[in-house]
Image (cartoon, rainbow, N blue to C red):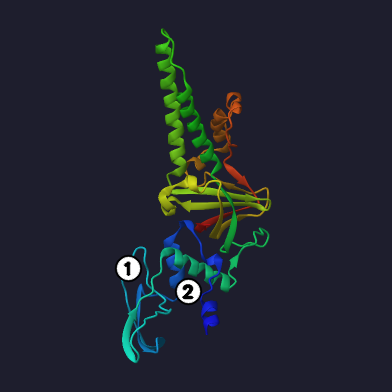
Amino acid sequence: MERDRKMKNKIDSNRLIIPIYINEKIVLDMLAIMEDGFSMVSQINYTEHKENSSTQKVDVGVSTSTMLLSKLLKIDVSGEANHVGNNGENQSIAKEKIHTNVSLLSKFRGFLVEQNILKSDLNFSKMQVGDFIEVEGELQKNPIINYMDRFIDLFRMADIFAEEPILGSKTQAKSQKQKENGVMKQIQMFTNELKHSGTIDFILSDLRGTTVLSAQEQYLENDNISEIIGGHFKVLGKVISICKKDTENVDLLRKTSLSIIQEDILNELLSEFQTEDMKQFNLPELKTKIAGPAVIVIPIAIYA
């Protein structure tokens, strides 16, 4: 009996996930489909009979009520409770089982695995739109946003190490500073335009191809993107577009109004950021397209 109890309580380590991004709405919607709808709060009543400090349980019924909780969801009542009392004592107990958004995510992922729905092999030739996939690797920011953010950082560093102008040249220095502030403002507006949709692209690349994650910023834990960049994570998501050939590409400006600008004009504008003077700085590659093979995924969760 003791061995059976231990085996029952053994937990697969893959279920113990720590998400830094979780789209709670998608998780709840998928679980509602799987369960054909579910109650937000469930309660189970049973009678416990204790004899010689041992516990015996008899289920006597289940009642449910609906109550919307933002983070704690009580569903799927099951489990054990121990109580030590006098011999021959009967006691009626009501118990609720609580799920958090993370435990619901683990439940959803477990369902996909059990039903062989989740694909972990990033094979672009066999992948189809609508597939649920789980990929892992090092996450990087949208290359064009990354470049602009680093460019702004470069201006800030220049201010920190700038020398005090010598007497007689303060007027010229002030004029130069105003010009630089104007450029900074333009770059900031350009960067804000890339982010105005409320979503941000993350890139996950390996030798097989590139996964572009179209993530909603509101679901990022603590809204701290820096915690994600460079970290090794797993991503659970659904495929919405596939570029199987190297002649196809993913446009990183597709969600912005900049996508209406003709490519030659856009390249001319961006060439201002790629002058000979800029080559002396350690700036990332500036690109607006991801060459295939590539896939666009709506991430449901990003986790360690």
Residue visible at 55% across and 81% down in the picture? 3
Q: Which callout, 1 or 2, points at the residue further toward the start of the chain?
A: 2
Q: Secondary structure at mark 1?
A: loop
Residue reaching furthest to the top: 168
The percent coordinates of residue 273 (x first, y second) are 55, 30
Q: Quadrant of residue 60?
A: bottom left
Total residue callouts:
2
Amino acid on which disc 1 is placed: Leu
Above or below residue 198? Residue 35 is below
Q: Nearer the viewer, residue 302 or 289?
A: 302
Amino acid on which disc 2 is placed: Met
On residue 23, the disc is: none
Q: CA distance from mark 1 to mark 2?
A: 19 Å
10 Å neighbourhood of mark 1: few (<14), some, or many (≥20)? few
On residue 34, the disc is: 2
The percent coordinates of residue 83 (x first, y second) are 37, 81
Q: Secondary structure at mark 2?
A: helix
Above or below residue 131? Residue 265 is above
Q: Nearer the viewer, residue 43 or 151?
A: 43
Residue visible at 37% across and 63% down in the picture? 71
Residue visible at 45% across and 59% down in the picture? 23
